[in-house]
């Protein structure tokens, strides 16, 4: 059992009693969490994914994003492929099993590569840079689908949000005199 599995067991319904039974001499049964397949040199990304899998608040935040009313469940795979794939993989990594399993991170790598095409996910890279790319990609994907109820003007214009895009469209129409007031002349 890895660190992620230990943290998950302590925070889940398994609790301390499960751990005590797990390490007692009368119990020979072993439990495991999933591991990630190394596809080339993507170990830098695997480390990030395994660390995120042990962050319950991060995983529940992804679930909250997927459960929001802004995107219908049937639209999620098209509009939020990275969030959907990441949520699914992190849940699989966190699941305690009675046998070893190797999971494929390609389900996350493919949608991530659409956001960071210049960053090769199959070659040795810096983990902190990859983490920033992942978080930025998640932000970009989510901001395309989410209209905040409360926000500052800086927040709205900083990202490519629906509110800002709609505002740009109206300004563009005014420039072409489609919505401009009739001139009196």
Image (tube, rainbow, N blue to C red):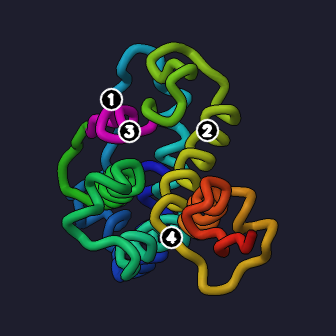
Q: How many neighbours does mark 4 have within 10 angstroms: few (below 14), some (14-19), or many (20 or more)?
A: some
Q: CA distance from mark 4 to mark 2?
A: 20 Å
Q: Residues within 10 Å of mark 2 (few under 14, many from 20)?
A: some
Query: Which-is-in-front pick, marks 1 and 4?
Result: 4
Residue at the (70%, 67%) spot, across then down = 156
Question: Which residues lie in the magenta part?
Answer: 103-112
**Res. 7 mark:** none
- Badge 1 is on which residue? 37
Q: Which label's residue is closer to the chain start, 2 or 3?
A: 3
Q: Nearer the viewer, residue 59 or 20?
A: 59
Q: Badge 3: few (under 14), some or many (20 or more) residues near its Cα, within 10 Å?
A: some
In the picture, residue 48 is in which quadrant? top right
Q: Secondary structure at mark 1?
A: loop
Q: Element under label 2?
A: helix
Q: Which residue is mark 2?
A: 133
Marks 2/3: CA distance?
A: 12 Å
| Mark positioned earlier in the residue sequence (4 or 3) | 3
Q: Nearer the viewer, residue 26 or 73?
A: 73
Lower sequence index among marks 1 and 3: 1
User: In this image, 81 relative to 74: left or right?
Assistant: right
Residue 146: give its label: 4
Q: Is residue 82 above or below residue 44?
A: below
| Mark 2 → mark 1, Cα distance in angstroms | 21 Å
111 in magenta: yes
């Amino acid at each position: 059992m890895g660190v992620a599995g230990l943290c998950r067991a302590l925070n889940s319904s398994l609790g301390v009693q499960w751990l005590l039974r797990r390490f007692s001499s009368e119990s020979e049964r072993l439990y495991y969490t999933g591991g990630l397949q190394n596809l080339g040199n993507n170990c830098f990304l695997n480390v990030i994914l395994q660390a995120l899998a042990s962050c319950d608040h991060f995983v529940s935040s992804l679930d909250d994003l997927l459960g929001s009313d802004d995107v219908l469940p049937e639209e999620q795979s098209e509009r939020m492929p990275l969030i959907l794939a990441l949520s699914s993989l992190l849940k699989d990594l966190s699941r305690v099993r009675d046998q070893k399993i190797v999971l494929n991170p390609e389900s996350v790598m493919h949608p991530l590569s659409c956001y960071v095409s210049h960053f090769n996910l199959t070659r040795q890279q810096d983990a902190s840079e990859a983490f920033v790319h992942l978080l930025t990609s998640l932000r970009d994907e989510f901001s395309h689908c989410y209209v905040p109820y409360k926000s500052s003007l800086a927040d709205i214009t900083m990202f490519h949000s629906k509110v800002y895009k709609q505002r740009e469209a109206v300004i563009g129409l005014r420039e072409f005199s489609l919505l401009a007031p009739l001139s009196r002349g």
